[in-house]
Image (cartoon, rainbow, N blue to C red):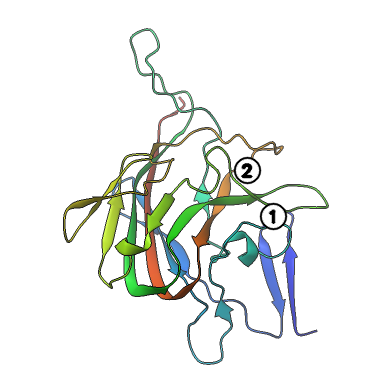
Amino acid sequence: MVAGFWLNQDGLPLQFGTQKAIPEVGGDYLIYGETREIEQLIPLIPMQTGAGNPLVAAPPTSFVGTTTPAAAGIQSLTTLVPLQLTAPQTSPVGGNIVLTNTQLFFESVEVETLIGTAGSGTSLAVGLATQTTGPTAAYVQVTPNAGVQLVNGILTANITTAGQRVTYTVPSTTGLKWDTATAVAGGGAWLSNVPLVTNAITPLPTSAWISTIATGAFTNGLLKLRLRYTMYGNIQQ
């Protein structure tokens, strides 16, 4: 045997065999305070880190959940984004804010250009993907707002030059381009209070992978995605 791929009972993909595993391009990091940060590299064409290592696949142009993680737009196999398992509590109860369940809040999403894009690609969408359960497990896009939870179609014009950075903080609206202070379309649907997951999966998934889908064919480009999030509420005594 040269290489293998297997999903364990937690639904996590495991690589085994004598062939090198696909390099990891993401991670979840502590920021002082209650905020955490997920960073992930998004190569827009296949990327090799170190001579002789396997390639990290480029994003597909459509989501396919019945074959490999790469076909579902998943480039990092171990970086997991938490999901909200209860509806966010944003209305007062009896004049008080009452938090009976843990709340998940996405503070911001940044898209930073490390290597400028080239080719006929026109935009990118970044969402979340999880797995169904059972013997025929498949990758599926998390709902609601499938495929656009983090970034909803950032245009190539805003990622063509190294050093360009766009920060989104309000759901489904524009973000701010740091070098020109101009508004840039493409804000993801899940910024701020994260909604309840609505996939028809039992039990509901507690986390998901980042899934990137490209529109058009890129011939160059490397981005870094930064997601800052926090959890709060539900202290029992």
Kindly give the residue lying farthest to the top in the view shown. 94
Q: x, y (%) of residue 110?
A: 33, 56
Position of residue 85 in the picture relative to residue 171 (left or right): right
SS under mark 2: loop
Q: Which residue is mark 2?
A: 205
Q: Earlier in the sequence, mark 2 or mark 1?
A: 1
- Which residue is pictured at 56% across the width and 73% down the height? 57
- Which residue is pictured at 38% across the width and 55% down the height? 154
The span from disc 2 to disc 1 (Cα, nearest Å) is 10 Å
- Which residue is pictured at 69% across the width and 56% down the height? 65
Does 169 sit above or below residue 101? Answer: below
Q: Which mark is residue 41?
A: none
Q: Which residue is mark 1?
A: 11
- Mark 1 crowd level (few <14, some 14–19, many ≥20, 10 Å Cα): some
SS under mark 1: loop
Kindly give the residue lying farthest to the left in the view shown. 180
Q: x, y (%) of residue 158?
A: 30, 61
Of 234 and 162, which appears nearest the observer? 162
Position of residue 203 in the picture relative to residue 41 (left or right): right
Of 116 and 89, which appears nearest the observer? 116
Does 43 sit above or below residue 139? Answer: below
Q: x, y (%) of residue 194?
A: 45, 36
Position of residue 34 in the picture relative to residue 219 (left or right): left
Does 224 sit above or below residue 84? Answer: below
Do the residues bearing badges 2 and 1 touch, measured as CB atoms within 8 Å?
Answer: yes
Does 153 sit above or below residue 163? Answer: above
Q: x, y (%) of residue 75?
A: 54, 66
The amino acid on which the numbered mark 1 sits, given as a three-letter code, is Gly
The amino acid on which the numbered mark 2 sits, given as a three-letter code, is Pro
Q: Quarter of the image containing the N terminus? A: bottom right
- Mark 2 crowd level (few <14, some 14–19, many ≥20, 10 Å Cα): many
Dividing the picture into quarters, in which one does residue 63 lie? bottom right
